[in-house]
Image (tube, rainbow, N blue to C red):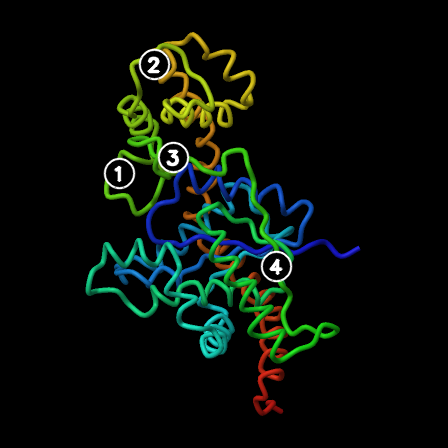
Amino acid sequence: MQRPRVLSGVQPTGALHLGNWLGAIRNWVDLQNSHETYVCVVDLHAITVPHDPARLAEETLSTAALYLACGMDPERCCIFVQSQVSAHSELCWLLNCITPLNWLERMIQFKEKASKQGDNVSVGLLDYPVLMAADILLYDADLVPVGEDQKQHLELARDIAQQRINARFGSEENPVLKVPAPLITKEGARVMSLCDGRSKMSKSDPNDASRITLLDPPELITKKIKRAKTDPQMGLQFDNPERPEADNLLGIYSILSGRGREAAALECADMGWGTFKPLLADATVSALEPIQHRYAQLMDNRDELAKVLREGRDRAEDTAQTTLKRVRQALGFLATN
């Protein structure tokens, strides 16, 4: 029986952090055992906002190395760099030409990011969701692991596939594109900032103390956790809307310590912050140590990393070109010999 296919990826700009790992990559590692898994470093998305071209290539390699260090296995999944598969850009253009402008203008993330950039907003930032749709649809993904903040983008991909391509250029019996479904995980799916328990941990937050990156050394991890925002109450608990920081930090501890929510809540129910924070720091350092060790090995052996990305690119290219040929044919383009 053919396994269901999933596709996901993260941008290479900015260091990957606990939220990326616990909310996304950790779940991809599990999925590769039961699903046909494609994961890419989405470097084309990285240039929708101002970026440093001198760092992009190295950050792309670093992100791919972290995928592997976190447990992605090239024998069980396809790991590749988005820009190295040209079909992403071509399908994006084809989808641009049939996607209504007002669909993009209503995207919440565009409104939020555009308000911060003022007059420097690029067409790429507006068009980001169409490129994301192309990423997903190229690989005939059955499922796309997404957080709550990306659900709107996945719905756009579904609408483009169903309403703008299949309905106009295909048929119910012979759809041009597969319409993907969301795969939303619960535990650890939304890790919040260390400075504000109501805001998501983010690579773009200007305050570095708001996040723990996967490559932070032990002393920096301990320092960030020691300074993390708390409240004056004794004891930690889940699901109290008046105590978002307690919920967030206890949630991180429950995962990184391996104790789970119930045991962690019981252990920390009467614990003060001065006792809890060193526990959380130790659990975090211990959980990240093997990732950092494997990452260092990979970055010291660029040949192994290049081989993984080359083989992943070739596999992704085969799948993507098959889908692109189908779309080109449906839209009426002259076939290549």
Furthest-top residue in view?
270
What residue did someone put label 1 on? 208
Relative depth, front residue between 105 and 33: 105
**Occupied quadrant, residue 28:** top right
Q: What residue do we see at 39% from left, 40% from top? A: 17
What residue did someone put label 3 on? 192
- Dividing the image into 4 quarters, which one contains the N terminus? bottom right
Q: Are marks 1 and 3 in contact (CB under 8 Å)?
A: no
- Dividing the image into 4 quarters, which one contains the C terminus? bottom right
Decide: is 1 above or below 274: below
Label 1, label 3: how far apart the Cα atoms are? 13 Å
* Front label number (4 vs 1): 4
Q: Are marks 3 and 4 in contact (CB under 8 Å)?
A: no
Q: Position of residue 109 (x, y in %)?
A: 36, 54
Mark 4 or mark 1: whose residue is earlier in sequence: 4
Describe the element under mark 4 as helix, strand or loop: loop
Q: Position of residue 271 (x, y in %)?
A: 40, 9
What residue did someone put label 4 on? 180
